[in-house]
Amino acid sequence: MTEEIIIAGFGGQGVLSMGKILAYSGIMQDQEVSWMPSYGPEMRGGTANVTVILSDDRISSPVLKKFDTAIILNQQSMDKFENDVKPGGTLLYDPNGITRHPERKDINIFKIPGAALAAEMGNPKTFNMIILGGFLNVKPIVKIENVKKGLEKSLPERHHKLIPLNIEAIQKGIDSVENVQVL
Amino acid sequence: MGDVRLMKGNEVIAEAAIRCGCDGYFGYPITPQSEIMETLMIRKPAEETGMVVLQAESEVAAINMVYGGASCGKKVMTSSSSPGISLKAEGITYLAGAELPALIVNIVRGGPGLGTIQPAQSDYFQAVKGGGHGDYKLIVLAPASVQEMNDFVDLGFELSFKYLNPAMILSDGVIGQMMEKVELSDYKPRWTDEEIEKISGSWATNGKKAGSERNISTSLDLDSAKQEVFNHKLQAKYRAMEENDVRFEKIACDDAEYLFVAYGSSARICQKSIELAREKGIKVGLLRPITLFPYPTKQIQEMLGQVKGILSVEMSAGQMVEDVRLAVEGKVPVEHFGRYGGIIPTPEEVVEALEEKILGK
């Protein structure tokens, strides 16, 4: 199994840390992983994206043009990455702030109202974990217990008290995915 | 399994330095390698192993601190990115001229000049052919994964002490900034004064011993006859490196009709290109030089009976391709494909270049 994923949105949405937790979860189930951020003079409010690959085999290129799954969290990223999903691949997006919805006919498309649910939970910082939950509903490539272990590994100990809230957010995400187009 | 973590290439360089018993790091910040010194500062190895970590006032100061530490037989290192390495070039040739072991890390960014902070491989000539003045060579290691960033710190020091010659890790922002699974090395203690005396006492300026001559650390000899003899000695050392310490990896070469030659992050991209090309029925393999000096010239020559054409893939306007052509001596077509100025080629682009430049011939 190899899953090649791009997560793209605004800086400050937790795009990079979501990728990191996903990668750590892969390590917890003995997979090879890579996490390649777009780095540069970016800042909060600018665009941020990260390519995450989980595989049972040695990973070839950490830099990719085509993806099995694109997780898209703002309009700029929709414009940039919709066409980079492989035919038959998956696009998961948060409709918040999206003015042009995906138009491809040859991919699976799912929606998750991450921003709305995070507001409902009263904590905007749970946003990226809700999205991660949505992804895990669509592509259950890592087990929740390995995500929990990944959180334990990637969060500093002083933040471990937040793990139950994160798991709750992931569960909310799992339960809140809407099918838009399933091939 | 040992200590397995998810880390950035740059962070791993720092961690590996502490664990391999490095005595001192002297640096000056520059993107995209500042995490090396930042990680060292956060880790405070002085409290753990006694390793010194110092932010110098400039790159020039940092490399000369390395010269000082190396002269004393210590395991010392510095790191920078392209413009900073140019500033260190004088110090590097002095290290080579004084036959001092040291580790220099270059996380290359696009140039020339201040260029960009994005990844590139346009410092190949500087690393492999000189950079500083005089007939000298660096041992140049090109990691292609975060694991190799870990492994090559220790290997770099080992080779540098074996040959009494500075070694360089030549990487770029892709490997420096990305995170992968890495198994960290076990801790090795720093050398004691007694061990340094045993290992390097014949040349190190670690204190004059009663009844023995002073050791002098210098690259200056105004007697040209002696300087030529010294240059012969250096050249013999470089030939010994070529004989004994070439490192490379071959991927999908057994049935290959075409060959990519690529190092570092470009070699990773080529591995994906191999998958894509083979889906189209193009039998292509990869020869990945791990040491850029000494270069795997013979290993490329050994492929010549088998392959019909070679594409050198680099994030430069065409530097390593010259060494591939020197190895091939016109026997098969050798072409170059590269993106540069901080642009990373996609695996698809590399396949297109192979079809156009090599298969199209």
Image: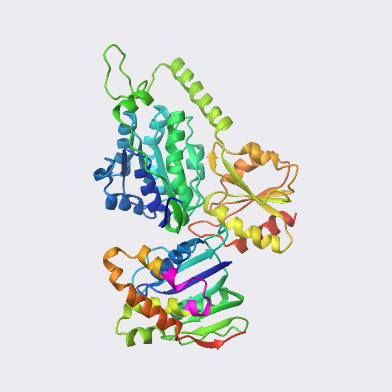
Q: Nearer the viewer, residue B242 or B182?
A: B182
Q: Residue at x 39, y 30 (%)?
A: B100
Would residue A159 be found to the left or right of residue A101 on screen? left
Position in image of residue B327 (x %, y %): 65, 38
Q: Is residue B225 magenta?
A: no
**Total count of labels:** 0
Q: Residue at x 26, y 66 (%)?
A: A158
Q: Residue at x 42, y 37 (%)?
A: B157
Q: Where is residue B248, by image quadrant?
A: top right
Position in image of residue B282 (x %, y %): 73, 58
Residue most extreme to the top: B211
Q: Is residue A138 magenta?
A: yes
Work out whether residue B55 can be spotted.
Answer: no
Magenta segment main secondary structure: helix
Q: Residue at x 53, y 24 (%)?
A: B236
Q: Which residues are magenta?
A: A135-147
Work out whether residue B92 can be spotted.
Answer: yes
Q: Nearer the viewer, residue B184 or B355?
A: B184
Would residue B146 be found to the left or right of residue B309 on screen? left
Q: Where is residue A172, by image quadrant?
A: bottom left
Whether A51 is drawn above or below B98: the answer is below
Question: Which part of the image, by quadrant, shows the N terminus of chain A?
Answer: bottom right
Residue most extreme to the left: B47
Position in image of residue A45 (x %, y %): 35, 75
Q: Nearer the viewer, residue B124 or A151?
A: A151
Whether B78 is drawn above or below A167: the answer is above
Q: Nearer the viewer, residue A53 or B163?
A: A53
Question: Which part of the image, by quadrant, shows the C terminus of chain A?
Answer: bottom right
Whether B221 is drawn above or below A119: the answer is above
Coloring applied to the structure: rainbow
